[in-house]
Amino acid sequence: MLRYMRKHARSWVTKFIFGVIIIVFIFWGGSSYLTRRANKVVQIDNYIISIQQYSKAYSNTFKAYQERYGKAFDNKMAERMNLKEKVLEQMIDNYIMEFEAKKLGVMVTDEEVAEAIRNVPAFMSGGEFNMAAYNRVLRYYKLQPGQFEDQQRKEMLRRRLQDIITSNVSVTSKEIEASFRDRNDKFDLNFVRIKPCVYEKEVNPAPEEIEAYYEAHKQAYKIPPKTSIAYISFDVASYIPGIDVTMDEAKQYYDTHRQLYTTPAKVRARHILIRIPENAQDNVIEQKEKEALRILEEAKAGKSFASLAKRYSQDPGSAARGGDLGFVKKDDLVDGLGEVLFSMKPGEIRGPVRSRFGFHILKVEEKKDAHTRAFKDARQSIIETLKKRKAKDVAYDDAYNAFIELYEDSDYNIFEYGTSHNFKVKETTPFTEKEVTDIPGGSVVVKEAFKYPEGEISDVIDTGDGYIVFKVIKRIPSRISELAEVEDRVRSDLIKEMAKDKAKAHADKLAALDTSELVKQKDLSIENTGFFNRSVWAIPKLGMAKDIIKDLAELKRPKVYDISNDIIIVWLNKKEEADVKTISEEQTKALKDSLLALKKEIVLGAFMNQAHLRHKIRIDRDKLRS
């Protein structure tokens, strides 16, 4: 099967893959043994992880988070998550799990790998495995089928080992009840906010205190390494004016990409969903079907379909809109619902239709036939597309030729090359790895610049708008600032720390009092959070405070916390305990699934801790920081 899939592989990509399969792409990255050894960041026994492999895995992980969370996920968020360390741990765990799986005789056959690949949604078209889609995705991630299949096998091996390790894990009814209480008990807290800035005017550190603070916190005043580069940018837009596209080329593109100019048939539909609980008994299914039939009769009798949907539909995504699904294509809907809708006429109501979610009552509001845009209407946009493609090819050729000539002749000056070939060469001022620059390609090129030694020529780098080739002109190593350079900053930092210490000392004295005495203290502004449960992302009026949520059971007496640079005294005002008798069947299942996943994670963690002890792991932290 794997040989068949390789033999029939083809062309390009537009899909992003979510789920288990993304692990294969995130942690893929190969390099030769000698390259890994020279640039190793981790060695596990005789296995080496290179800085290039680690950098690629981190970059892919970062991009995956950005795809999911958008602009909200940035470098600061990654630092708060300790993402660099997590990626490193995952790479180490991946190797150890593969080793332990093989030691235990765990196997994954070629047919099992092929079957798993056949069932990846991103590789399917019309519900069937599509070789062209498979090849498009792999080309997008710059993977050969053999490489992908090898990584897929390893991922399956790891998951099979996890299943073996956690196969005996179970959840009891008492654990479910305890979890329900833990998630649904409500707490109302009193708190007093003490601002350290109030104490800043009371502190005046002596020169020797400033010096001592500097000596103890030197790393905070470290200047990061910098580099400067000279680069040639091959901007695609600058090549477009010199590109010609013939009418025959445009027509050929239109004929071979007609699907791009075809709008598929669509229907505007409404539906009412009566959900069937997972693993429901036959009598429950029969009851749900009767409920759907009753609603169908009301709809056919002339009652407003939208009103019925708002009242009865159990689809949270459409019920509030009167069951409106908008315009949908046949393949947009699961389990043959599209086939049913496209066989109906506008105004027709039909049902109940069974799907994996339950029983649907369907109504078609409007139908739109498929439409193909004529060549004469699409011609100009096709010409522009082909011009950009040709321009990109020419830009890449120029960039590649520049790389080859500069790389093969180390004495060839990049400035001389630019002059002799009529390319503009720009030289930057020194920049840090996290600095925002106006270099084409932005942060991608900046990060690449720190991977090459002084005097080295870079590979051809895709900037999105073209290509760039650069030479590292100068590397400036990191250093710790002298006290004289940062004395004002050190003094300010010390004043803030001393003021916070004073605020904390005052808060500790107040927290030692009984709450009845605490509330009588003068000049204290006592605030109240209102009720919340443990599942909140942020406590009302206090924000993100994981330590407080963790300590909720211990807050009968006041306790002091440092939150967002303020000192907070917190104690319990009221607690409302959840009633376990109100747990629904759906909640029970969700809690059971969540607890099972958590317990499996704990068991797997214990196994991995023991497995780590059986391996010699060496990490080069200096390479990680550089």
Image (cartoon, rainbow, N blue to C red):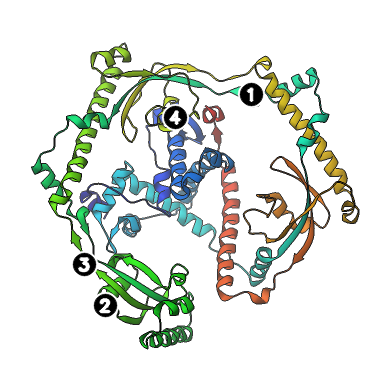
Occupied quadrant, residue 571: bottom right
According to the picture, the residue beneath numbered tag 4 turns out to be 447
Q: CB under 8 Å between callouts 4 and 1?
A: no
The x, y position of residue 617, in whole percent, is 55, 36
Near-viewer residue (416 or 235): 235
Label whose residue precedes the other's in the sequence (4 or 2): 2
Q: Secondary structure at mark 3?
A: loop
Relative to 112, 104 lies left or right: right
Label whose residue precedes the other's in the sequence (3 or 1): 1
Give the amino acid at mark 2: Met
Q: Nearer the viewer, mark 3 or mark 1?
A: 3
Q: How many angstroms separate mark 2 from mark 1 (CA)?
A: 71 Å
Occupied quadrant, residue 117: bottom left
According to the picture, the residue beneath numbered tag 3 turns out to be 369
The x, y position of residue 151, in whole percent, is 38, 47
Q: CB under 8 Å between callouts 2 and 1?
A: no
- Any mark on residue 221, and which? 1
Q: Secondary structure at mark 4?
A: helix
- Residue 288, compared with residue 100, is above or below; it is below
Label whose residue precedes the other's in the sequence (4 or 1): 1
- Any mark on residue 370, and which? none
Q: How many angstroms separate mark 4 from mark 1 (CA)?
A: 22 Å
Q: Nearer the viewer, mark 4 or mark 2?
A: 2
